[in-house]
Image: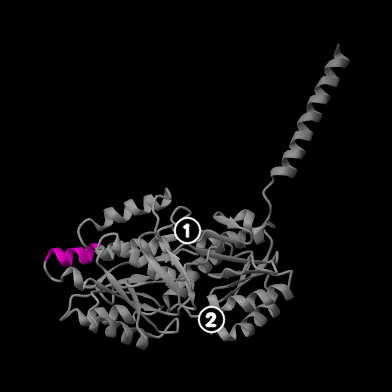
Amino acid sequence: MKRLYIITVISSIGVLLLGFILHSLLFEDKSPKDIKVGFIYVGDASQAYTHNFLKAQNTIESKYSKNVTIVAQYNVPEPDVENALKTLVEEECDIIFSTSYGYGEKTKEYAEKYPDIEFCQATCSNANESPVLDNYHTFMGTIYEGRYISGYVAGMKIRELIDNGLITPEQAVVGYVAAFPYAEVISGYTAFFMGIRAVVPEATMLVKYTNTWSSYSLEKQYASELIDMGCVIISQHSDTFGPAVACEEASVTKNVFHIGYNQSMADVAPTTYLTGSRIDWEPYIVKAVEAMLYGEEIEKYVEGNVNGNDIGGGFKEGWVKMLEINTVVCAEGTQANIEKLIKDFKKDKIQVFYGDYTGVNPYDENDTISLKKPFEENKDSSAPAFNYVLDDVIKVIE
């Protein structure tokens, strides 16, 4: 009996020891590796678009300062991205984030040349195009959701102006200062316009392209020209305060208000700025860096909507954020409506690109669309795909 007892005790200890070893092998916390992270920016901290990426970079530096070295290239024009890529490769970066649409083609070429480096390209849709590379990834927030809500806020302000007799329904004209005639920009201003039309069905929109991402003087000039054409709301897909300043200056004699993008414009347009939206890049960039630190696959580690080597997300995933509203200027009930619309987006209750509209692709007049059947934006890619200018209701001003 004593021998049997000893054997039982030894066996039990052996089972416990084996269990502990297996648990340690399967569930132990991995120690992070030391890695070098590269960033390529089209601007710097003074520009709202780049500033939003820098928030993610700062989080990485704060959270993983012992294991991560950052190498950043600022103010890189899109045609010059190869020089920046070459520098970061020579710096022996383990992962490189390219943050402007025009970087995409060259960044993918470098990913093919350097398969041991991970390349993550923002706002592009070419990760799943041939050749598909294991080390080339694309990502973007579904910003059309934020654009739509911004438009709804603008629509509420226009409705207030109409109800107060300050403008007629026929004067519900909206101006948009756009960067380039890319799908990303066209999708954005269309979503914005659809939000306005949800409140003011009579509204129409005028669009002017600057053909640059960032030019304070040109953006302000085009906004002023749109205001002179009778626009009562000005919004933008461009990087400077120019349109907001134009609205503030014009408001002395005209009814005009501003919707921003990427950052609040309340400090430069306190009596005309309403609100805006932005992409939060942290959910992707921070997690992608963590994947590298712990030896995980990016698409399996980042929380978002995964499609091959591409990941996106909206309000539901925390990738899109609304900026604070200017309560002094916004129409009554604005905040409550924003909160309701965000909840509806999270529940997939809103169809943005839908209605009695037709549109034409500006690059191919034979490519047309009818929105009587809803267009599902970001269905196959995190980058926007809607690339049609709506007939009769949206006019591009040359």
Across and down, in percent, residue 236 comes to: 36, 75
Q: Is residue 201 visible?
A: yes
Q: Is residue 350 left or right of residue 184?
A: left
Q: Quadrant of residue 122?
A: bottom right
Q: Quadrant of residue 153?
A: bottom left
The residue indicated by pointer 1 is 376
Q: Is residue 253 left or right of residue 220?
A: left
The residue indicated by pointer 2 is 74
What is the C-alpha distance between the residues marked 2 and 1? Answer: 35 Å
Using the image, determine if residue 318 lies above or below residue 251: above
Using the image, determine if residue 242 lies above or below residue 160: below
Asked whether 162 falls inside the magenta stretch, the response is: yes
Residue, x 51% and y 62% (percent of image)? 282
Asked whether 109 falls inside the magenta stretch, the response is: no
Q: Nearer the viewer, mark 2 or mark 1?
A: 1
Q: Is residue 36 left or right of residue 395?
A: right
Using the image, determine if residue 266 lies above or below residue 306: below
Across and down, in percent, residue 128 comes to: 64, 65
The colour scheme applied to this rendered structure is one colour
Tags 2 and 1 touching, CB below 8 Å = no
Q: Quadrant of residue 25?
A: top right
Q: Is residue 240 left or right of residue 169?
A: right
Q: Which residues are magenta?
A: 156-164
Q: Amino acid at mark 1?
A: Glu
The quadrant of the picture occupied by the N terminus is top right
Q: Is residue 324 visible?
A: no
Q: Main secondary structure of the magenta part?
A: helix
Across and down, in percent, residue 320 comes to: 44, 60
The quadrant of the picture occupied by the C terminus is bottom left
Q: Amino acid at mark 2?
A: Tyr
Question: Which of the marked residues, 2 or 1, is nearer the chain's N terminus?
Answer: 2
Across and down, in percent, residue 379 comes to: 52, 58
